Amino acid sequence: MTDLEIAQKVKAKHIREIAKKLNIKEALLEYYGNQKAKLPLNLINEENSGKSNLILVTAITPTPPGEGKTTTSIGLSDGLNYIGKKSVVVLREPSLGPIFGIKGGAAGGGRSQVIPMVDINLHFTGDFHAITMANNLLAALIDNNIQSKDKNLGIDPRTVIWKRCMDMNDRALRNIVIGLGGKAGGVPRETGFNITAASEIMAILCLCENLENLQKMCGNIYIGDTFEGKAVYAKDLNAAGAMTLLLKDAIKPNLVQTLEGNPAIIHGGPFANIAQGTNSIIATKMGLSLADYVVTEAGFAADLGAEKFLNIKCRKAKLSPKAVVIVATIRALKYHGGKSLDSLTEEDINALEKGMPNLEKHIESIQSFGLPIVVSINAFKSDTEAEKDFIYAHCKKLGVSVALSYGWAEGGKGCIELAEKVVVAAKTCKTAFKPTYILEDSTLTKIEKICSIIYGANKVLLSDIANKQLKRFEDLGYGNLPICMAKTQKSLSDNEKLIGRPENFDIHIREIEIAAGAGFIIPIAGNMLRMPGLPVNPSSDNIKIDSDGIISGLL
C-alpha cells in the first residue's frame, strides 16, 4: 500500500484521547475537527521542560532515494512509547511547495506517520495561510506608504528588501515589477516573492516566546532605507499590531497523533536550506513540559538543519539536546559512493565504503558540538546482511552507536533497538552543547567557522555585493547576530553536484540578507534561491480526488 492508503486504513482516535496521554484537560483543547487541536501556550512549564530529554534527529546529505528523517523521528517516538517511555514527537508543518513539486509530503511514511495525513499535508489548521497574510500585509503597507503623500516616510523604493510570499513553488515570481498601470497602480519598482517557508514571519513565529514577544519581533523587521539613508522598520509603519493579530491562532502549536495513537505536536515549517529549518521553540518547550522524551527533527542534513537548530534555536531558547540521531540509508550511502540511481538495490560493499565519508563528516560535525550520537540506518528490503554488517563494523571503528530502524515497515516495534540506544546515549550526556561560534565573533568569522568546521571548506569568498551588504548590516548594529546560511542541501559544498565528502572547495557568498526581527544574518551561498521552481513532472500530476472525496496520488 502507499503511505496514503496506509494512513486511510487506520482508525484514528479522537484527539481528546491523545491529549489525555499528555495529561491535558479537554477544556484546554481548541478543536479543529475530531483529530486536530490547538494547544494554549500556558501548557509550557519552564521547570518541567528542563528535566525532559530532547532528542534531535538529523541526517546525511540528502539523495534522490531519500533518507527518511521524519519517518525515523515518528518511529523513534513510537518506539520510545513502546518500551515504556513517555514520548512525544515534535515536527514542522509541511509546505505545499514540495508537496505539489518533487519531494512530496512531510508526514512520515509507511507505519511511521502522523495523521490526519491529508490535512497535515494540505491546509492543516491554517498556520501557513496566516503567516503568508501577515507577510503580505507588511508588503502592502510598504507600497502604500511609498504611494501616499500623507505620513510618507520617504522610503527609497530601490532599497526595499521585503518581499511578498506564497506557499507554492513558482519561479516566475522570483523577480517581478509591481506598481504598473499609472498612478492608481502605485509606484513601479522591482521586487519578488519568497516561498512562505522562507518568510521572516515564519522564522519569527518559530523563534518567539509569546504574543508580546512576537509583536516586538515583527516590529523590528528591517524593510529598507529612506532617501536620506535612514533604516526603516515595520514598527515605523505601525504594522506589528495588525501582523500579530493575523498570527494570534497560528502561534498555538497543533496536537495530532501517530498511526499508533501516540501524541505528536506539529508547528511551524521553515526550510533548512533557506531558513532555520526547525519547528517552533514554543512547540518544543511544550513537548518538553508534557513528556519525558521529545523527539524532534531539523531539516535536511546535519550541515543545515542541525547546525541551525543548535546555533540559532537552542542558543535562543536555552535548550540542549541529550542525544542526536543521524539518519542514513545503505542506498543513500552507496549513491554518495558513486553508484548509479538505477543500481542502488544491488549489493555493493565497495560503493558503500566509498560513501561512508559523507556520514563520517556529519558525525564529526555533531561531535564538534560535544553531543552523544546514534546512527540510525533506515532499513530497506534490498539491504543485504553483508552491507548491514559493514555499517555496524564501520560505526564501531568510529566509536559511534548504531541501530537498524524498521519504522517504515513495523512502526514503533521496528524501532525498539534505536529507542533503547537513544535512551542509553541520552543518559551519557552531562553537559550542554558547545556552539560553533560565539556571538561576539565578527559576522565574517562566524560564517567562516560554519564553513570550515561544519562543511569542511577551505575559504569563504564574498562577492562585492555581499561585502557591501555585510558592511551595511554591521553599521546598523547587527554584527552580533547568529548566522542562518542559505545553501544547497544536496552537497556539503555550495555546488550540488559535489556529492559524498567534497575536499578542497571554497564557499561563495553571493548576497547577504538580514532578518532583524527574527534575529539572524542570512548569507546566500552559490546559486541558492528562496523561491523554488516546479520540476518538469511535478507531483501534482498524479494527485486526484473522486466524486466521493477519495484522494489518491498524495505522497
Image (spheres, helix red, strand yellow):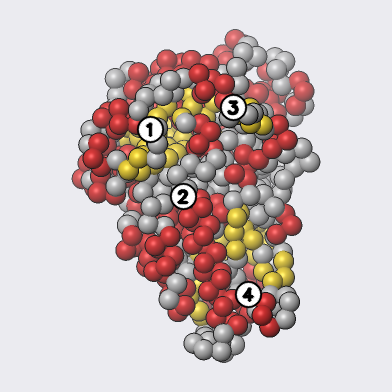
Which element type, helix, strand or loop, lies under badge 2? helix
The residue lying toward the viewer, choosing from 170 and 12, is 12
Is residue 478 something that shows in the picture?
A: no
Q: CA distance from mark 2 to mark 4?
A: 36 Å
SS for dot 1: loop
Mark whose residue sits in front, 2 or 4: 2
| Residue 98 screen position, x and y as percent | 63, 42
Instruction: Classify 402 as above or below 190.
Output: above
Q: Nearer the viewer, residue 318 or 542?
A: 542
Position of the N terminus, as image quadrant, is top right
Q: Which mark lies nearer to you, 2 or 3?
A: 3
Observer-side mark, 1 or 2, equals: 1
Q: Which residue is labeled 4 in the image?
A: 468
Q: Residue at x 22, y 36 (%)?
A: 25
* Mark-to-mark CA distance, 2 and 3: 27 Å
- Closer to us: 65 or 217: 217
Q: Quadrant of the C terminus?
A: top right
Contact, mark 2 vs mark 3 (Cβ under 8 Å): no
Q: In the figure, is residue 4 to the left or right of 465?
A: left
User: Which badge, 1 or 4, is on the more N-terminal residue?
Assistant: 1
Q: Of marks 2 and 3, which one's residue comes earlier in the chain?
A: 2
Q: Earlier in the sequence, mark 1 or mark 2?
A: 1
Gap between marks 3 and 1 measured at Cα:
20 Å
Q: List the residue tagged with mark 3.
A: 548
Q: Inspect the image, locate mark 2, and give the three-letter code of the amino acid beneath it.
A: Asp
Dot 2 corresponds to which residue?
127
Judge left or right: residue 466 versus residue 308.
right
Q: Nearer the viewer, mark 1 or mark 4?
A: 1
Lower sequence index among marks 3 and 4 = 4
